[in-house]
Image (cartoon, helix red, strand yellow):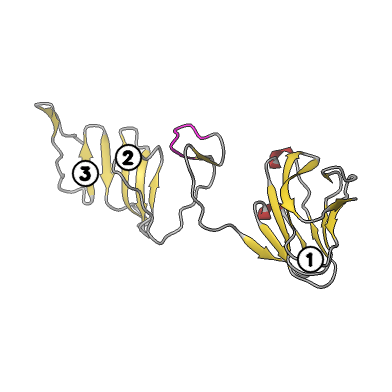
Amino acid sequence: MKKPKLISGLFTIILFLGVPGRFFAEDAEVKLNSNDGSTKMIVQDKDAKTVSSFDSAGNLVVSGTATVAGSKFSVGGATLVVASGNVGIGTTNPGAKLDVNGSAKISRYLTQAADTGITLSTADFGATITVNSGATQTVALPAVTASDLGAQFTIVKQGVGTVIVQAAGGTSIADSTSGGTIYNNSATETYATITLRLTSSTMWSILGGNGSWTTN
């Protein structure tokens, strides 16, 4: 099919009769409906490669890089998911899952009650674990690898019962034995806290806290 010619430096787009729902330019094609009806609009390049499309549910799919030229980008009340790669704020070359070049403000941190003890997983990284119990309770740390370096937990003792933090096999907490523990058994320290960060694939280091904690 003949395509429009370049006239005076501008592309003239012509809607050809007999080809409903399609627009052609010199090096692109826009189809308003796919053949099977699954896509409402498709933009293809001159090689018939899809550049972007809207599916029948109104979802936009961009095959390349999307650039927002305006001053704001908003998803409203929806959920924004980045399936893979890194997200950068204030940087065009993020070196982590979230790389913020500048100050960051977080209004709330994940807090999880574990009044009857808990076995943590890597999905719980970053959480604050509260334990309010009159009996001994154990917070078991997850098994980790070198890819988990920087992971962190904070444990808060709110009850009179002993709180034991148990390392997984092959890892230690500060100077504890491998697979050892750190615990607080003071009935009066209902304010005790401890923050642990994974600083090697076999070591949880104590970043801070208060109260009387003992390794074993």
Let me know if residue 30 appears in the view: yes
In the picture of the structure, the residue carrying the numbered disc 2 is 44
Q: Quadrant of residue 197?
A: top right
Asked if marks 2 and 3 touch (Cβ < 8 Å), the reply is: no
| 32 with respect to 65 (left or right) | left
Element type at mark 3: strand
- Which mark is drawn over residue 117? 1
Residue type, numbered disc 2 = Gln
Structural crowding at the residue carrying mark 1, measured as other residues with C-alpha within 10 Å and reported as few (<14), some (14–19) or many (≥20): many
Q: Residue 198 placed where, x, y %? A: 73, 43
Structural crowding at the residue carrying mark 2, measured as other residues with C-alpha within 10 Å and reported as few (<14), some (14–19) or many (≥20): some
Q: Which residues are magenta?
A: 88-94
Confirm whether the magenta stretch covers residue 215: no
Q: Earlier in the sequence, mark 2 or mark 1?
A: 2
Marks 2 and 1, how far apart at CA: 56 Å
Disc 2 versus disc 1: nearer the observer: 1
Q: Earlier in the sequence, mark 1 or mark 3?
A: 3
In the picture of the structure, the residue carrying the numbered disc 3 is 23
Q: Residue 162 placed where, x, y %? A: 84, 64
Confirm whether the magenta stretch covers residue 92: yes
Q: Quadrant of residue 151?
A: top right
Q: Is 183 placed above or below 45 here?
A: below
Q: Is 8 placed above or below 25 here?
A: above
Residue type, numbered disc 1 = Gly
Q: Quadrant of residue 84?
A: top right
| 67 with respect to 198 (left or right) | left
Residue at the (9%, 26%) spot, across then down? 8
Marks 1 and 3, how far apart at CA: 64 Å
